[in-house]
Amino acid sequence: MAYITFDTDKCKGCGVCADNCPQTLISMDEERMNALGYRPAVFADPEGRCKGCKICAEMCPDICIEVYK
Amino acid sequence: MALTLTKGNEAIAEGAIHAGCRFYFGYPITPQNDIPEYLAREMPKIGGTFIQAESEIASINMVLGAAAAGARVMTSSSGPGVSLMQEGISYLAGSELPALVVYISRIGPGLGGIAPTQGDYKQVTSGGGHGDYYTIVLAPASVQEMFSLTIKAFELADKYRNPALLLCDAILGQMKEPVEIGPRPDFKDISLPDKPWALNGNAGRKSNLIKSLYLGDGEMEVQNWMLFDKYNKMKQEDTYFETTDVDDAELLVVAFGSCSRMAQTGIDMAREQGMKVGMLRPISLFPFPEKAVAELSARIPKVLVVEMNTGQMYKDVKVNLDRAADIHLYARPGGGLPTPDDVLEEIKKIY
Amino acid sequence: MSENITPATGPKKIMGRPKCLNDVTFHFCPGCNHGNVHKMIGEAIDEYGIQDRTIGVAGVGCGVFLYNYVDVDVLEAPHGRACAEATGINRVHPDKIIFTYQGDGDLAAIGLAETVHTANRGENITVIFVNNTVYGMTGGQMAPTTLLGQKSTTSPYGREFMGDGYPIKMCEMLATLEGTAFVARVACDTPKNLMTAKKAIKKAFKMQIDQMGFSFVEILSTCPTNWGMTPQQAYKRVAAEMIPYFPLGIFKERTTADYM
């Protein structure tokens, strides 16, 4: 199994992770804002589809994502 | 010690080698090309590095890099080139880096000419570049001093973590005099200060950072006052000047560099004619010998500044002059060199 | 039959912050590729174990805060002069790994002479060139790499050949010099491009470790704020407008050092 975690304090809501996840498991929080004023990314994987491909973490410009596998 | 007939520019280059400088980055410009040419020949022999850079801008920035890396390093140039270097010199001061800039002045402004001048006094004693800083400025008046003050300049630069400038002119650079230069010490025998702040890889310590950017609220004010304190310390501990025949003098000549040589002969001629004239020769132009001017002018009421520009050191003398003293200026800019007879004439007018 | 096996160890972290990057928030704008480039540099330094003998030289621009992010000795250079400063450091410490971090104004406008001559001398250093076709830090002025027709605050009607010249292709130019050992242009706009960029940056550092000469990587990067775009639009612009003019690829790769 695989999953990711976000450092939401550093997230700038750019959405690049969401744009590139091959399993579309990431979306941008539509309600919450972090202390920087951005809507951070959210990981939702109820079906356990995350393969740990690391594309999100590679593409994130702010090193917010840790990948576990 | 045996004397060697040595050219001024080459005495500087040899002095740098004696001081443990093993890095030279420079660019050709008249009248200082002997310096890079000498070091191009000598540096490879002693495991040093010589680069003829693509410009004076590149030169001063290579100096900055090497200084940040912890080495004794120098460059040399003349008016147009030193003007290009001013940004780098400001960065050296702001980053608190030691380095030597050798300045062999030529007439200006602009392309000017290649004749000697002292017209860059105000540029170098006011820092020269942007910002609240100064460079240490030493002014040799002989080939022997071109050698010894080069070594002194490196020592002061390291002592204060500040750039130092050796202000000479085309005469001093090109002339030859007998000089005492001992054998070259081995690099390992040269005592160099530790530089724990230098950049050489952070093994076993925290990373070092060399910068001059202070954006935080109030940060730069602290920095500026810290530099100010540094310059005050220089004033207290490292002001250099020479006085000749001032004990009974009734007229004080103030002159520096090559001009002081002409002035001294003029003074000697005046003494032969019974006039009591002495000379104050600033050797450090920054810090300027303010106290010496104040003390000497307090008992010598007539002061004659002789310089090869339109009146630059004159202002520094005037501001420190005793209130009761009279100040006069004999100014010869643009390569018009005062002869001893010229100086004698001026002395006679005032005495 | 399903076995209830509790794995001896749970999922392991397979990607995170490079060890040599400080755990701080980047000041860069959302969707700016500076962060990606910093990360790739960090990964290269970690992979080769060179943190304690690496010295960085920061140019002036958004990259000036390199020293807040990468935990190595760092020198802040005047605008455009990082290559000359890296030369000075390299001559004092030829055994250290030295890299510069410069934007397009810093490296290709005010610093063009230092960049070309440092490459020409074959200095054994690595130059990281973040090309986002504008001056970012100062608010989006025209840069040497601004594209024809591109509007900026100092080319408000769009860059024109007559008057502004064509954008400069640094990789192509530097590859003609004998002193360069590795010259590559990459981008971070897609996962595929980003993985190639990572490889190129690692290769550039490896070339330096192997004393091959001057290595240079140009990274086509986004600047959403000064392009007036969302991050999504900015990433698309890299592919649609920048890559056609600045083709990706390796322009030079020595297999023997230039001094041989």
Image (cartoon, rainbow, N blue to C red):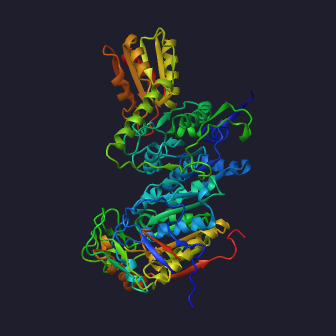
Q: Is residue C219 visible?
A: yes
Q: What residue is at 51 percent from the left and 81 percent from the top?
A: A1
Q: Can residue C166 be spotted in the picture?
A: no
Would you place residue B92 above or below residue C208 in this image? above
Task: Return the x and y of residue B313 as percentages of the image width and height.
Answer: 40, 30
- Could you say which is closer to the camera, residue B268 or residue C242? C242
Q: Which residue lies most toward the bottom here?
A: C1
Q: Quadrant of residue C55?
A: bottom right
Q: Residue at x 32, y 76 (%)?
A: A28
Task: Describe residue C186's horizontal placement relative to residue C153 as left or right.
Answer: right
Q: Nearer the viewer, residue C190 or B152?
A: C190
Quadrant that contains the C terminus of chain C: bottom right
- Residue A61 position, x and y percent, is 42, 71
Location of residue B27 with respect to B106 vertically, above or below:
below
Q: Is residue C68 above or below residue B349?
A: below
Q: Is residue B7 left or right of residue C240?
A: right
- Counting from the top left corner in percent of width and height, residue B210 is at 49, 49
Query: How many numbered marks appear?
Result: 0
Please say if B145 is above or below C17.
above
Quadrant into which the N terminus of chain C falls: bottom right
Residue at left offset 62%, top offset 61%: C50
Q: Which percent across, then down, holds residue C149? A: 30, 80
Q: Nearer the viewer, residue C175 or C53?
A: C53
Q: Quadrant of residue C245?
A: bottom left
Residue found farthest to the front = C1
Q: Quadrant of residue B335?
A: top left
Residue appearing at x 39%, y 10% in the figure: B299
User: Which residue is at the front of the view, C164 or B41?
Assistant: C164
